[in-house]
Image (cartoon, rainbow, N blue to C red):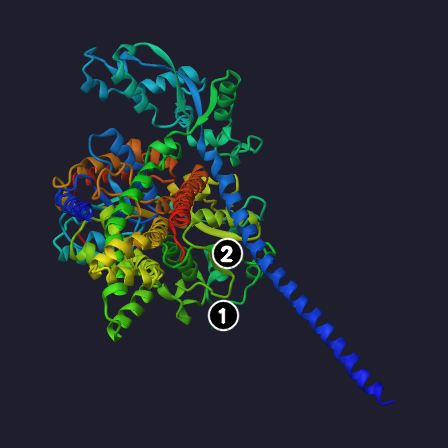
């Protein structure tokens, strides 16, 4: 009994002494889309420098912002990743807590609609995509529940196939970006939609009658399901298409196939920018932050020949990249 | 005439009873069949599950190596010939490697070719070269044949997970790389070895460098904290409730609440840990100490309930005999009841620990779902645990992580089976029946 008491006392004192130690590794939180890139840089950085390897946590963009903006001090993360730009409300929250931020745009990510190699080729406009997946569509001057069951009902040029789309759940950043870019984009150009109140947020509603199946956050799972069912389409990030090019192919949107060059040039319509944000107050307090930012924004990482491209990142154009890396390494403050 | 109706009744009654008996037997046989079918279905599903995990996980235990002639060019590695270790450590190993690759692979002169060549081998090779030079600076300026790890894509190709017959556009490995690889194969410079990396490193973004050790150490540290906290507290609560507490309404309320607590979803304990341990006590995120505390809360009810059952199973005659011999109640408990109940208590504890080992949800909340490359050294270092590692790898886009996910599940299952086996053995060996 005595020994046990001693062990417990020892464990507790170890814990207390441990927590009093200063943190010597960078802590990164945020988007699961940026996670594969951020971790790749963290690992390279840990190996090539004398600093400890940064710890990267995948919390989602919103969750990351909340943690990041909650305060200054080593209990709070130093960097947050985001698959969209910081919102004004999040910025205000950060400012309220006295945090100065440096914004770094790292590149692009495409969102693809893909099906099995053996399936039909599809070339859609955003409008057709909206008509296939929206909860309510305008018909005969009023809004009705989406009546389309086959692609060919939307447009005779499309294949006579049942519409069946697997996609991420609403908690996912990919879903957010998909509804904002693809659904809203299609809705905007649809004749007569605006008059019926279909604008902005109202366009985001995805049908719930079983045509769109929420397949979970795991994109690998969607790829496997597509392989098993050649008639179904899936929505996921470009890096998964890139890694599984022997199993699935991407549908063209507005005539542009989801290929590396097309996304990099901005021709492929469903793409978004990826960011990370640095807490300036932690630079010099937590060792290695400045060096980490330099490592991330060096051409051997995020350039067209860098290792991040192999992970599926689509780099910024050369001029933007040079400007951005200067801005990042100079730790310019973000204002909104 | 008078006999006939009676005979009829008797005959009918007999017939019916025989039929009823047969019907009862039939019903019993049916019932046994249902039971058997249920067990067979469960076993079948278990077999399918294990088969799919093992068959997809086994390839992860081997890895592909290729023999390369690496030139340790003095101009790149040690331009001023100082052999100062600090300078050697920061030499241009990538440059030296690229030169070696150019000599090795025809066509690697162009930018595209260079990338194809460098993607043939693991990106840890530059660090391997650095370590070789630091260990023995005399190899500078020489060419050495070194077995190096291939990249994950080449590994998949060697294992047959990438089909060589597919058209080039559908393949992760292009024709040039395939040509180089087949040349290496012809020259007998490709070998398959046991994947020691998988058991000696922590997580990595490169599948061929990723390992499970970081998660195993994280799990061990976390479970140690869980055991140290939940075992004494759990056993003491059980002893008090069972042996000392008066039986009144208050103890009833406590008992009901403990039982309820055992049924609370584990994510709730995670939220509690976030609010209390992280936000209020400002303990570090992602640390095994916090993970262990959260899991201890979750395991406590299991241990208390199992311990109480074990204490209840000790016959009252033991207590009465001890008290009759003049022992105090504390002596009765510590000298007689507790040792006799210990096998049952330990079994319950091990099962509780096994549950804690497989838990992911509460750890999500306290930041243990993170990418951590360094193996944790203390209770406050950032760490992940085994099931979280499975979760992280299942989400990774690289194809080679699929087999590693299954391999990690195999490691986790091995630990769970070992713990449960230990619990069964303990019970078999020490349990006493009265």
Q: Residue furthest bottom?
A: B2
Task: Classify 10 Å Cα crowding around label 1: few (below 14), some (14-19), many (20 and above).
Answer: few
Inter-mark Cα distance, 2 to 1: 17 Å
Element assignment for label 1: strand
Both labels 2 and 1 in a single chain: yes
Residue B357 % position (x, y)? 35, 48
Q: Is residue B297 left or right of residue A289?
A: right
Between B349 and A74, the one nearer to me in the picture: B349
Residue A225 visible to the viewer: yes
Q: Residue at x 53, y 57 (%)?
A: A164
Q: Quadrant of residue B201?
A: top left
Mark 2 or 1: the one toward you: 2
Circle 1 residue: A145
Residue A280 % position (x, y)? 15, 45
Tell me the number on the disc at residue A165: 2
Between A189 and B165, the one nearer to me in the picture: B165
Between A81 and B84, the one nearer to me in the picture: B84
Identify the chain of the residue marked 2, using the numbered disc in the image.
Answer: A
Element assignment for label 2: strand
Residue A217 % position (x, y)? 40, 52
Task: Classify 10 Å Cα crowding around label 2: few (below 14), some (14-19), many (20 and above).
Answer: many
Q: Is residue A125 left or right of residue B312?
A: right
Q: Tell me which numbered mark, 2 or 1, is placed earlier along the sequence.
A: 1
């Amino acid at each position: 009994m005595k020994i046990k008491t001693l062990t417990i006392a020892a464990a507790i004192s170890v814990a207390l002494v441990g927590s009093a130690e200063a943190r010597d590794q960078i802590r990164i939180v945020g988007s699961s889309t940026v996670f594969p890139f951020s971790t790749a840089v963290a690992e390279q950085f840990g190996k090539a420098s004398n600093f400890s390897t940064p710890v990267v946590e995948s919390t989602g963009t919103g969750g990351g912002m909340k943690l990041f903006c909650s305060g200054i001090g080593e209990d709070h993360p130093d960097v947050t990743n985001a698959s969209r730009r910081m919102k004004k409300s999040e910025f205000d929250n950060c400012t309220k807590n006295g945090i100065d931020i440096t914004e770094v745009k790292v590149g692009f990510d495409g969102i693809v609609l893909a099906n099995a190699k053996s399936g039909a080729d599809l070339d859609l406009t955003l409008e057709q995509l909206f008509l296939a997946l929206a909860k309510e569509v305008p018909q005969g001057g009023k809004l009705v529940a989406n009546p389309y069951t086959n692609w060919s009902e939307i447009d005779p040029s499309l294949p006579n196939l049942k519409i069946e789309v697997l996609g991420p759940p609403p908690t996912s950043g990919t879903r957010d970006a998909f509804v904002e870019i693809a659904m809203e984009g299609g809705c905007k150009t649809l004749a007569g939609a605006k008059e019926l109140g279909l604008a902005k947020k109202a366009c985001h509603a995805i049908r719930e009658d079983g045509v769109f199946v929420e397949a979970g956050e795991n994109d690998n799972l969607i790829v496997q399901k597509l392989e098993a069912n050649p008639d179904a389409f899936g929505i996921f990030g470009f890096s998964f298409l890139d890694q599984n090019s022997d199993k699935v192919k991407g549908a063209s949107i507005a005539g542009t196939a989801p290929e590396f060059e097309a996304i990099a040039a901005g021709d492929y319509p469903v793409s978004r920018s990826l960011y990370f944000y640095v807490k300036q107050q932690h630079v010099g307090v937590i060792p290695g932050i400045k060096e980490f930012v330099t490592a991330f924004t060096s051409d051997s990482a995020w350039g067209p020949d860098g290792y991040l491209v192999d992970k599926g990142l689509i780099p910024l154009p050369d001029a933007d990249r040079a400007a951005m890396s200067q801005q990042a390494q100079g730790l310019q403050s973000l204002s909104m | 005439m008078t006999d006939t109706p009676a005979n009829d009744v008797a005959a009918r009654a007999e017939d019916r009873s025989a039929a009823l008996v047969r019907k009862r037997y039939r019903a019993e046989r049916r019932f046994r069949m249902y039971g058997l079918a249920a067990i067979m279905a469960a076993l079948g599903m278990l077999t399918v599950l294990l088969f799919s995990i093992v068959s997809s996980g086994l390839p992860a235990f081997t890895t592909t190596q290729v023999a390369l002639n690496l030139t340790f060019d003095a101009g790149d590695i040690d331009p001023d010939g100082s052999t100062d270790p600090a300078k050697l450590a920061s030499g241009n190993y990538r440059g030296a490697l690229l030169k070696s690759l150019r000599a090795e692979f025809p066509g690697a002169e162009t930018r595209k070719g260079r990338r194809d060549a460098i993607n043939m081998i693991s990106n840890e090779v530059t660090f391997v070269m650095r370590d070789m030079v630091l260990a023995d600076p005399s190899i500078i300026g020489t060419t050495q044949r070194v077995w190096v790890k291939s990249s994950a894509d080449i590994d998949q190709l060697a294992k047959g997970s990438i089909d060589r017959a597919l058209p080039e556009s559908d393949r992760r490995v292009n024709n040039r790389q395939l040509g180089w690889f087949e040349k290496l194969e012809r020259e007998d410079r490709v070998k398959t070895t046991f994947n020691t990396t998988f058991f000696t490193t922590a997580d990595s973004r490169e599948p061929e460098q990723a390992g499970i050790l970081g998660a195993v150490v994280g799990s061990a540290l976390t479970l140690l904290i869980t055991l140290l906290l939940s075992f004494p507290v759990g056993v003491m609560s059980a002893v008090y409730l069972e042996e000392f507490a008066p039986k009144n309404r208050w103890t009833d309320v406590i008992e009901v609440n403990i039982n309820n607590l055992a049924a609370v979803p584990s994510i709730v304990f995670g939220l509690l840990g976030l609010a209390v341990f992280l936000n209020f006590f400002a303990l570090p995120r992602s640390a095994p100490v916090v993970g262990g505390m959260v899991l201890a809360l979750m395991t406590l009810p299991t241990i208390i309930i199992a311990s109480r059952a074990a204490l209840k199973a000790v016959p009252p005659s033991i207590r009465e005999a001890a008290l009759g011999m003049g022992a105090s109640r504390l002596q009765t408990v510590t000298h007689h009841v507790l040792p006799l109940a210990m096998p049952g208590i330990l079994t319950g504890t091990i099962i509780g620990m096994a549950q804690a080992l497989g838990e992911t949800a509460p750890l999500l909340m306290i930041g243990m779902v993170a990418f951590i490359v360094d193996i944790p050294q203390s209770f406050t270092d950032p760490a992940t645990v085994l099931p979280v590692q499975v979760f992280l790898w299942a989400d990774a886009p690289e194809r080679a992580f699929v087999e590693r996910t299954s391999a990690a599940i195999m490691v986790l299952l091995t630990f769970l089976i070992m713990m449960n086996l230990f619990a069964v053995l303990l019970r078999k060996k020490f349990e006493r029946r009265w």
